[in-house]
């Protein structure tokens, strides 16, 4: 291929008259032959030689397109100005002759040999082709073709050398792989011998295991026979158990029927007792009124519960002496607020409340302080309505903070360290005189049973909560 596309420019007529004929070119010949196809290394070498001498030319001898290129740094001149340099060398013979003169002067004997049309055998074919293209002696095209063939031969030689090197590397790797394979084969033979030895041991162990298996199977058959026998016995025992269970269920059904009859009888008896109790209370109430008029007793300043409260405030005082158990039964506990109203209507009734048992059942989502405040406030309303004595008991060894002002007629007590509110409630009940109506509000079964034995009336917490909700 040509060095580059023909440069679209022409020399002025006055410069064209000074152009000397090129070396090896017949001036009388016809149209010039087309540019030969240059190998890429030759083309790059021509551009590099031209770029090297370009700054040394006078400014008026440098074509206008190349004057800016001539100012480039040496390492950029051939790289960035290659298209413009190639175009000028192709289109401007005078510029090429001026460049050739300087290049030949720098090349020495090699340039002189190329001008003569010969090339030393040891010369670089690329250099020879580049000088031949610039100087263009006779047979310069043959020199370029010979240089191209030499370049291609060198490239082919490099390819062949690379192939030979790769083949040698593959052969070396193959030899290494064969050595590794021999080592692996030795290892595999040793491993095979070891595996055969282990196989022999496994076969011996297999024979022993087979003998053990046969013995185990024999024992299993005997165990299966024994198991079948035991299953028969268990089935008979299960049948006997089922029969006994059916008999027990029949007896249980009879007992439940009898219990139902007993509950019905007890309910009827309780209704009779309630009627008798109501009549007794009415009689006692009328008798109490007549007795009070007859005895003309002066009112007292302290109630029995006040003595219990004073004993609580004195940590050094001993616990109040337990009073003797008193005979007599009072009303059974119920959650009916009407029952609570009926009992509080009795003369000089004393209402004792298990504080936290009521508050946690009625409004347990509040804090303890809010629970106490709400209950004490509600009890103040009941005391104001009925005029009865009201005592509320809380668990707590230390004095509580944040208590609301105690309403008139309400007494607030906290159990001492080592004593529960249930025990304090029983002490309050035991301190009351026989015959005084004492109403204890608590849903604790043990509290209800304990105070009932001492003649108090136990009621559930729901009765007081409904009474407070109604107020």
Image (spheres, helix red, strand yellow):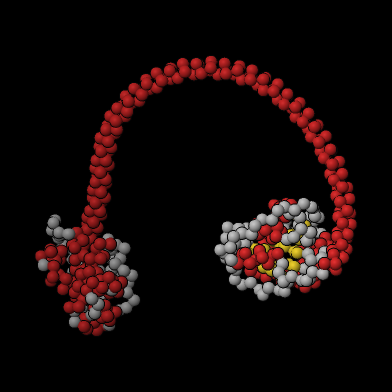
The quadrant the C terminus occupies is bottom right
Q: Position of residue 401 (x, y in %)?
A: 59, 71
Q: Which corner quadrant of the image does residue 228 belong to?
A: top right
**Percent of width and height locating residue 445:** 71, 52
Q: Which is more toward the observer, 53 or 195? A: 195
Q: Is residue 106 visible?
A: yes
Total tally of numbered discs in the picture: 0
Q: Is residue 373 above or below residue 450?
A: below
Which residue of the protein is positioned furthest toward the front in this rendering?
295
Quadrant assignment for the N terminus: bottom left
> Where 139 falls versus 218 (above or below)?
below
Does residue 96 appear anywhere in the picture?
no
Q: Is residue 449 left or right of residue 110?
A: right
Q: Position of residue 30 (x, y in %)?
A: 28, 69
Q: Residue at x 23, y 67 (%)?
A: 46
Tell which of 418 and 162 is nearer to you: 418
Query: Toward which corner of the image does residue 15 lie, by quadrant?
Result: bottom left
- Dividing the picture into quadrants, the one containing residue 364 is bottom right
Up-down relation of residue 249 to residue 435 (above or below): above
Where is residue 13? Give x, y as percent.
27, 83
| Apparent side of residue 246 relative to residue 283 in the rendered image (left or right) | left
Question: Which residue is depicted at the point 32% across and 72% down?
Answer: 6
Q: Identify the residue at image location x=75%, y=64%.
A: 350
Figure check: 205 above or below 262: above
Q: Is residue 213 left or right of residue 379?
A: left
Decide if residue 202 is on the left or right side of residue 300. left
> Image point 71% across, 74% down: which residue?
407
């Amino acid at each position: 291929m040509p060095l580059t596309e023909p440069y679209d420019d022409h020399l002025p007529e006055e410069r064209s008259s000074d152009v000397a004929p090129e070396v090896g070119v017949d001036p009388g010949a016809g149209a010039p032959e087309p540019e030969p196809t240059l190998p890429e290394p030759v083309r790059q070498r021509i551009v590099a030689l031209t770029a090297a001498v370009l700054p040394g030319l006078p400014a008026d001898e440098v074509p206008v397109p190349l004057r800016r290129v001539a100012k480039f740094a040496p390492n950029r001149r051939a790289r960035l100005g290659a298209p413009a340099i190639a175009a000028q060398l192709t289109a401007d013979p005078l510029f090429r002759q001026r460049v050739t003169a300087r290049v030949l002067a720098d090349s020495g004997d090699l340039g002189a040999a190329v001008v003569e049309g010969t090339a030393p055998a040891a010369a670089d074919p690329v250099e020879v082709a580049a000088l031949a293209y610039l100087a263009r002696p006779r047979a310069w095209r043959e020199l370029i073709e010979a240089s191209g063939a030499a370049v291609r031969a060198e490239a082919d030689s490099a390819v062949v050398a690379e192939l030979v090197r790769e083949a040698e590397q593959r052969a070396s790797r193959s030899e290494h792989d064969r050595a590794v394979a021999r080592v692996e084969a030795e290892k595999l033979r040793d491993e095979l011998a070891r595996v055969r030895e282990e196989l022999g041991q496994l076969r011996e162990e297999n024979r022993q295991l087979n003998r053990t298996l046969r013995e185990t199977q024999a024992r299993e058959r005997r165990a299966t026979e024994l198991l079948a026998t035991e299953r028969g016995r268990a089935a008979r025992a299960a049948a006997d158990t089922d029969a006994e269970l059916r008999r027990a269920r029949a007896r249980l059904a009879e007992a439940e029927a009898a219990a139902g009859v007993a509950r019905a009888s007890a309910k009827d008896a309780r209704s009779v007792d309630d009627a008798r109790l109501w009549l007794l209370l009415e009689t006692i109430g009328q008798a109490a009124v007549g007795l009070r008029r007859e005895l003309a007793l002066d009112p007292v300043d302290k109630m029995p519960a006040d003595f219990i409260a004073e004993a609580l405030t004195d940590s050094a005082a001993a616990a109040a002496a337990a009073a003797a158990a008193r005979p007599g039964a009072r009303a059974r506990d119920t959650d009916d607020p009407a029952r609570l109203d009926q009992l509080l209507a009795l003369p000089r009734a004393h209402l004792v409340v298990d504080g936290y048992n009521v508050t946690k059942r009625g409004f347990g989502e509040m804090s303890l302080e809010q629970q106490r405040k709400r209950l004490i406030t509600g009890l103040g309303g009941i005391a104001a309505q009925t005029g009865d004595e009201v005592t509320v008991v809380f668990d707590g060894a230390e004095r509580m903070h944040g208590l609301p002002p105690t309403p008139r007629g309400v007494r607030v007590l906290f159990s001492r360290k080592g004593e529960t509110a249930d025990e304090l409630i029983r002490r309050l009940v035991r301190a009351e005189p026989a015959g005084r109506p004492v109403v204890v509000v608590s849903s604790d079964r043990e509290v209800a049973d304990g105070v009932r034995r001492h003649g108090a009336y136990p009621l559930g917490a729901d009765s007081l909560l409904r009474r407070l909700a109604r107020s």
